[in-house]
Amino acid sequence: MTGIIATVTVFAMAQGLTYPLLSFILERQDTRSGLIGLSAAMTPTGFIVSAPFIPALSRRFGAIRLAILCSVLAALSLIAIAAIQDVWAWMPLRFLLGVFANPLYVISETWLLAITPAARRGRILGLYSSVVSGGFALGPLSLGLAGTEGWPPFLIGIVAFLLCGLIVFAVARRLPAMPQEGEATSVAGFFRLAPLLLLAVFVAAGFEQVLLALFTVYGAALGSPEQRIAALITCFIAGNAALQIVLGRLAELSGSRRTLLACVLTSLAGCLLLPVLFDTWLVWPLFFAWGGVSFGIYTLSLIQLGERFTGQSLIAGNAAFALVWGLGGIVGSPATGMAMQLAGHQGLPLSLGLLSLALAVLLMAEKRRY
């Protein structure tokens, strides 16, 4: 279990490094902001395209071989990106980076769900989410040590990708086999099995991507200094990493469905309170809690996946989660950006609030049926 979590944490750190690093480089090259955004969208596009093939590939080649191969191919992709400093060449390379990264996430989460005892599922998956979030946050922080020029920052990411493969190889004998029981389930088939669970993943992805991509625009419109905006985003990420174990424990005590609904309603409350509290000191605890509960929607969805599905449906569900997370990353920011153009800067909390409200209504409607 420790090896699985360590693998994904290191991988998340490498990915967390590439997003800001490549944006900094493109900015220095005077690349248009729209083109920078399009370049960044290539990685989640790779997630979306690769997700339907992961269950079949893991059955054909074996999960361990596939994970190690993807680690090596991701490292080679980053070497090519470092060697070719051109935005158009980066488009297919960043797409491939998403293609190679996705199977490792899907396989690792499936392994974790397969070996986690039901009585401790909430705490363990909460720990997993917290540690992976912390790993993703370490990526940008490492740029403070290595800088953003030359090979040093790229070498950190390349070594991290290769280290993932080494960890999987080292713990291979203790890793569980991929679940094979039950009928083979496609990613499209899983959409019919759990549409509301996948909507929850979409909402969680939308929250994270929108806040990271557009909160700087929101804060600037309200006259907030850049340092304060950056500090608030850091506070949001800190809450994301710190509160998942607490939410996982609440799921064990109160049930995952009830805790998921509580996270959605609290996220909605954050959207309503943001315009009121933005210029007060209360915005700091708001952002800490908001970061925790909005990502908690994903953690609770993952817990429910482990509770409701086994066998080949489990790996199909994890692949569907990855696909929907990619969709949330691609659709959420442009849609919210358009809302901000039409309704002003308050289009940000308005868009996220409407998304939260829709999910809350559907969850409460589902609750009445049980």
Image (spheres, rainbow, N blue to C red):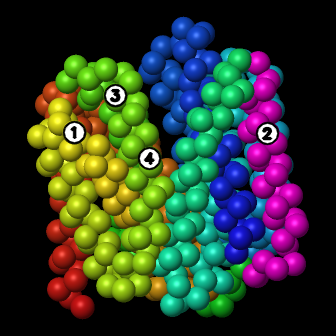
**Amino acid of disc 1:** Trp
**CB within 8 Å, label 4 to label 2:** no
**Amino acid of disc 3:** Arg
Residue at point 43%, 40% (across, down): 234
Place residue 311 in its image quadrant: bottom right
Numbered disc 1: secondary structure: loop
- Crowding at dot 1, Cα within 10 Å, few <14 / some 14-19 / many 20+, comes out as few
Numbered disc 2: secondary structure: helix
Residue linked to disc 3: 228
The disc, 1 or 4, on the residue closer to the chain's N-terminal end is 4
The disc, 1 or 2, on the residue closer to the chain's N-terminal end is 2
Numbered disc 3: secondary structure: helix
Report how far apart the C-alphas of labels 1 and 3 lie in the structure: 11 Å
- Is residue 163 highlighted in magenta? yes
- Crowding at dot 2, Cα within 10 Å, few <14 / some 14-19 / many 20+, comes out as many
Q: Give the side of residue 204 with respect to residue 261, left or right.
A: right
Dominant secondary-structure state across the stretch colored magenta = helix
Residue at point 80%, 33% (across, down): 155
Which of the two residues, 109 or 63, is positioned nearer the viewer here?
109
Residue at point 45%, 65% (across, down): 244
- Crowding at dot 4, Cα within 10 Å, few <14 / some 14-19 / many 20+, comes out as many
Residue linked to disc 4: 237
- Quadrant where the N terminus sits is bottom right
**Residue 26: x, y in percent?**
59, 17
Q: Give the side of residue 93 with respect to residue 151, left or right.
A: left
Residue linked to disc 2: 158
Q: Which mark is residue 281?
A: 1
Report how far apart the C-alphas of labels 4 and 2 lie in the structure: 24 Å
**Amino acid of disc 4:** Ile
Place residue 334 in its image quadrant: top left
The disc, 4 or 3, on the residue closer to the chain's N-terminal end is 3
Give, as a single range, the part of the protein colored magenta.
Answer: 150-177
